[in-house]
Amino acid sequence: MSLAQLHYTSAPPGPDGSGFRFTAISDGVPQGLLREAEQLIGYEPPRDLPARPDAAQLSRFPKALGCHELSDGGRLLSRTVYTGADYSGRWGNFHAHALYLPPGARLPDGALPITAWESPRWADATPADRRPAALDRLEPSGLLRRDGLVAFAASRAEWLAAFFADLRVLAEEPDACQLVLVEHDSAAVAQWIALACAVLPREVAHRLTFTTYTRRPQQARQQIVGALPSSEPCPPGPRLHDCTGRAAGGAVPDAWADTCARVWCAGRPELFRDASLDLGYLAAAALTAGVALRSDARAAAAHWAAERVGTLPEPVLTALIGVLSAATVTSAATGAGTAETGGERAAVAALLERVEGRLPTAVTAPLAGRVLTSAVLGGGPVPALRAGSLTPVVRDGLARTLAAPLRSGIADVREPATGRPLLLLGTADLLDVDCQDLLPELAGRLSRVLVAAPDGTATPGGEELPPALLAAVEGHPALRIALFGALDALAAAEPAAVARRLAGSRLPIGLHPGFPHLRMCVLAPGGTGPDRADRLARFHGVVRAAGVSPHADPAVLRTALALVWPGELPTSQEASLLLNELGSDIHRAAGTRDVLVDAALAAPPDDVDVPVLAADLLRCFPAELRPGQRAALLLLEFTGLLGTGGEGEEWVGRALGLRAGAAEPVPDTVTERVFAALARRLVDGPAPDSELYGLARSGEARLLAAYERAGHAERVRDRLRGSPEYAAACFCAWSACPGVHPAWDETRTALLAKVLRPVVRALSAEDLAGVEDTLDRAGGGRLDAFRAWNRPGALGRLTGRFAGRARRSERPPVRHGDVEPPAPERHP
């Protein structure tokens, strides 16, 4: 098939006119495209070349080979050359020889348009008969042969990657940009275009539009535009690549472009045979061909292979694995684009995961060694390799290379102990690198991390341990012993905190005997509530979990108490049982005596077993108690004696004396309990007059307040209403000792007015008679005083007298139990 041709130049006058015109046109060229073609094949000579060149100079003028897109979808492939003077002798003539390719048509044999550069089939003049000769193919010139392009690429190595990066943008989005290449001659531009077409997918290369020369690049419409340094400046917009000066420094981010440049510089253009924009495919081919690539390209090759493990021929996959395995793990300081990145480490590790077990170990072991080396030296994730992942030769080599970095990583306190150091320890075990001396410090760090929350506080509720830690503890006996020892020490110091964190953690404490404090924290049963029986039962369960008797190791008792009663004290009953069941000697040895003492001293008022515990403590620790503790316990024991045959005499004096004589302040809880018990005993009666006098004379505000509260109790009111004898006794008690102390006067008059008077006023005549009969038998004017006090309107006057408002010099002497007689009644 003959190609449709056009010739265009300045010609003598003829039927079609004179000047620049089409001088020869094949029959297959649509006449409607001639004006469009005329705009594409023009030529302006460079300004810096001779205006009237001779034949030698004329050969140095640039040649414009162009591939243009036409409005009908076809292509126009043209070659325009400067011919000097025209038929009339006027300078500035040129000749254009063009081929019209209809929509969808290509050059014979599928040749790329750029291969037509300086083909011998191009004509520099119009055929004599003005009829284009038949043209069925365009033989390429020698300029674009393989060796020539390789040499040219090497000479332009500085600009290659940047050019290919812009070319990629152009290929993915044809209208995104325009590339302008500045060279000293158009042949170099043609070579650039040949390089571009080689790296592009074949279909994209066929659609590429270009021109190897124009004096006005700003007016060019092609995708790649060639220009000379003397051409008009390129306006903002196109991506300019001036190859006549110095290349811009810095690496090109586009890994595909960088790989293309490296392949050309390595002289391996055949790798572009199945060219695509897929970096992974190209990088894999380049690596297996021995082309050195930078890290991101190697990562792309590894990813590409990992995704095709099941489909790639085994020889191809094995070759690529060999190259990736041999890649040296270097630092960024080595330069030359060889530094390994985290992306490459991850990609190679993913490839290893896919191929391990599919290929022979002899093939994958070097890759496993590379992954492991990268992880240790580069700080990346440490792979969990199996013992069978490495051959003996690879393992021995890794042990020599990685021994020091592994030990440094295990001892690195900047890393979380439960993370990387543990994984490195597993790697050291795999490579048989001795790290025994590092285990105590690592175990200490692990124990502190396990027990403490991120903010340094103990976390509530048990949590499962990290899988890596569990695996290390189960598979590394030396680490297990060191860790359990460190945790046991922490458990002895802070049992509750350790138990909160490790209970339910699945820590394999059963793999080793010993470590009783840790065992209690991990294996002890949980509490079931505040019930005393439950807590004591749990205490015994905790002790059993220790695996050792408190008699053999008293510290176990201290830990058990802290676990069962964390942040609180046993009740008095619980403390008594703990004391009597275990004996005082074990509490002395364990240092838990003060826990029992504090349980007594801090017991709430409703704990009725406190006196018994106090007596037990005084009996069991007669010499060890501090003076302050002894005084407080004696007071508590005394509260249990009140109302019994052992209460003795001088209750108020004894209580106040013990409290005042204590070497340390008596706890308020003890004081309140003693005063409450003493007040109740005095209110309930019968009480000797001397005790009442001692109460009145003491003026002790807290004791008097307790006495008043006891008098206000509802049980007292009930008893007053039901017992005339008790009502009479209370009147005697609350009327006694007037003026002994102002505080006493306030207390007794308040009880008379607010407790006794409402009850007496509500008594039946029979019960009131019973009160008066009791007072009459008591004698001493008590009946008269009662009647005067109970007479309507007399309370305020008598209260003033009972309060001792008269001056002391006017008062008669007062004896214990005396009742002040009523004053004479005054009449208005």
Image (tube, rainbow, N blue to C red):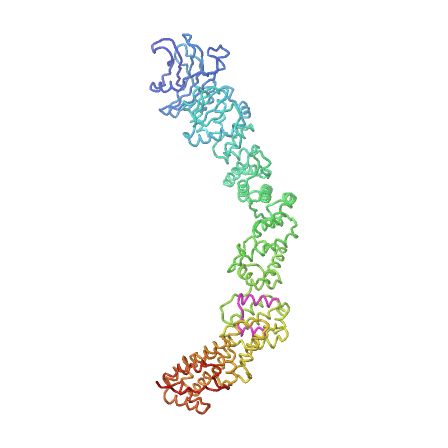
Q: Residue 503: x, y in percent?
A: 54, 61
Reply yes or no: does residue 558 show up in magenta: yes
* Residue 140 in sight in this render: no
Q: Residue 61: x, y in percent?
A: 48, 15
The residue depicted at 55 percent of the width and 82 percent of the height is 650
Q: Where the N terminus falls, by quadrant?
A: top left
The residue depicted at 65 percent of the width and 48 percent of the height is 433
Question: What is the total number of numbered labels drawn onto the structure image?
Answer: 0
* Residue 84 in sight in this render: yes
Reply yes or no: does residue 19 show up in magenta: no
Is 162 situated above or below 232? Answer: below
Q: Residue furthest bottom?
A: 777
In the image: residue 158, left or right of residue 783: right
Q: Residue 596: x, y in percent?
A: 57, 71
Q: Where the C terminus falls, by quadrant?
A: bottom left
- Of 238 and 604, which appears nearest the observer? 604
Kindly indicate the quadrant of the structure image that contains residue 129: top left
Is 384 situated above or below 216? Answer: below
- Of 316 and 398, which appears nearest the observer? 398
- Of 705 and 569, which appears nearest the observer? 705
Q: Residue 678: x, y in percent?
A: 51, 79
Bounds of the magenta segment = 555-580
What secondary structure predominates along the stretch shown in magenta?
A: helix
In the image: residue 712, left or right of residue 251: left
